[in-house]
Amino acid sequence: MLIPDNIDKFESHGERLLYIKFKNDKSATKFYVLHSVFTNYHFKNITGELDFLVLAPGHGIFAIEVKHGGVRRKGGTWFYENRHGKVTATKKSPFDQVSGTMNSIRAFLLSKLADKKENYRFSKILFGTGVAFTSMNEFVDFGQEAHSWQILTRQSMKLPVYNYIDTLSKGLHNQHKRKSWYDVNLSIPTDKDCKKIIQILRGDFDIDYSEINKIIDSDYLIEEHTKEQFHLLDILNYNDRCLIQGPAGTGKTIMAIEAARRKILAGKKVALLCFNRGLGLKLKKSLEYLFENKMERSFSGTFHTFMSDNTKLASPVSGDDKTDFYKETLPFEFLLQNEYIPEEEKYDLLILDESQDLITPFYIEVFNSMLKGGLKDGSWVLFGDFSNQAIYLNNPIESINLLNEISTFTNFPPLKINCRNTKKIASHNTLLTGVDKPDFTGKSIDGDSIVDVFPSKNKQVECVEDVMKELLKEGVPIEKVTLLSPKRIENTFIKDSLFVNELISNGLTFSTIHSFKGLENTIIIILGFEEITSEESKRLLYVGISRARQKLYLILNEELKHDYQKIIDKNIIKLSE
């Protein structure tokens, strides 16, 4: 049991990794894991904080300090380097730090137990410490400062986290078992003891037991790379040109951002580009901190923004003119203005996310002009779904043929593990669009059932309003919900709802499916389809459904119910393949 169990922001990436390990380890479900335990009752300092306090019935109580990033010790001073390159130094070792805070919390607990018998019982429970070095690949001997069994490394994190707690328990009990005060029975906490400790400590931190935790699981799970994805990122170091394909939800965008981050930190000039505006904003935001740290030579965002910033050309107002402008006028002007750009000013690496929307003859010429060595001899990585998500360009096979004509590249086997959607959402996508059933890991969430309703045309607004009212009643933050439609809002029945429009002005998002490509949200409500049988509708449904992480609503005209059931009956066999 994690307390709290809905954290989406962490002080360090290492804490995030360990939190995920505790959350997903089924063998550790009987542990009570408190994250970020703060105390005002520290022996030596004004305050103190534990990264994790693990109450393990049958094992012991363990305080765990997490250190992520670069760590070194020189002349008795410890140096820590974070992901931004900032180095901090301290004379206090992490083992001393966690021990001091743990003993302070233990003393606080005992001070709250007025009953002598109860105080005696809890004074016999063993409290131990450990330090997780989540960036350290191999074990380092820390000498007299720590026992080997106290240390968790990147290698040992490949095992269930239960193994680490069990190792801490055995090490702690072996350390004390020969001491006169040690009692093998009293030293081990029961489940009742652990619950009592939680009750005492609860005032020191905020525990969220709200209903929302049953609806929205922690969003950080989406960012957990599978072993397959980590493997591919490592392989990028040995292949100059790569095409990485995969269906929606397999983590392509996360991988693209991570690949860019690694190369930028290595001093490379990187262009991370996409087609969609919403996704472009996400890419830009994800790497902004690097640009703030004097790495502004690189670029992340939409391809069109990249060209517009370079040429200083403004987009026309009308829709038809815009299409021609972005397809031909803007790239042509970019080529004219950058015809004689020196090779040393070009980009070292080009990364395209949702690349199936960007491989056109005109765009290819721009890529050739901006990349050292061009597409033929330069370094590039293309992430895309060339089978299902090409809703801007309708012939993805032609795009791959274009690439084959230009250069040789490594075309990796497609990503298969879905790390975004619940099993029920991904399975429903197969039922409704006919796409192949994705693979899941043992950690994948089964999730809530899909809610599909078929109101008459004059009841659709009321239906959406009812769904929103129910979600708000359950305490779902409004920004966790997105309404998706194949049409703009002014062309849907939503435009007539004062209630929904007020919610939109307060943080609820409405988007066309086209504009939401590459993005996601906890809860997705799909509406506005006039038909669901054409290839175009299937592509849009595929993209729309795959945006939902935890909960999916389909609100469709009652006239579509027959087609809906017919499609599901046809595709249901795919779930057994």
Image (cartoon, rainbow, N blue to C red):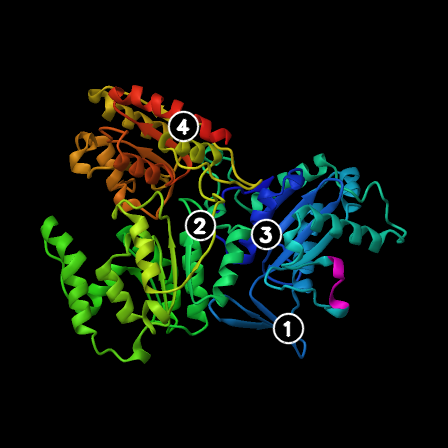
Q: CA distance from mark 3 to mark 4?
A: 39 Å
Residue occupying the point 44% across, 39% down: 421
- Measuring 50% from the left and 57% from the top, which residue is drawn there? 232
Assess whether mark 1 and mark 2 are in contact (beta carbons under 8 angstroms): no
Pick whichever, 570 or 6, lies toward us.
570
Q: Quadrant of residue 546?
A: top left
In the rendered structure, the answer to whether residue 205 lies left or right of residue 475 reads: right
Residue 537 placement, left or right of 119: left
Q: List the residue tagged with mark 4.
A: 571
Marks 3 and 2, the one that precedes in the sequence: 3
**Which residue has dot 2 on it?**
251
Mark 3, other Cα within 10 Å: few <14 / some 14–19 / many ≥20: some
Q: How far separated are the C-alphas under marks 3 and 2?
A: 20 Å
Q: Which mark is residue 18?
A: 3
Q: Position of residue 192 (x, y in %)?
A: 71, 34
Q: Which residues are magenta?
A: 144-149
Quadrant for the N terminus in the image = top right
In the rendered image, is residue 36 in sight? no
Looking at the image, do the residues carrying marks 4 and 2 touch, with CB atoms under 8 Å apart?
Answer: no
What residue appears at the point 31 percent right and 25 percent down from the top-left corner? 466
Depth check, mark 4 against mark 1: the one in front is 4
Q: Secondary structure at mark 4?
A: helix
For marks 4 and 1, give the CA distance: 63 Å
Earlier-in-chain disc, 4 versus 2: 2
Nearer to us of marks 3 and 1 is 3
Location of mark 1 (residue) = 91
Disc with the residue nearer the chain's start (3 vs 1): 3
Residues at marks 3 and 1, CA–CA distance in whole angstroms: 25 Å
Q: Say whether marks 3 and 2 touch (CB < 8 Å).
A: no
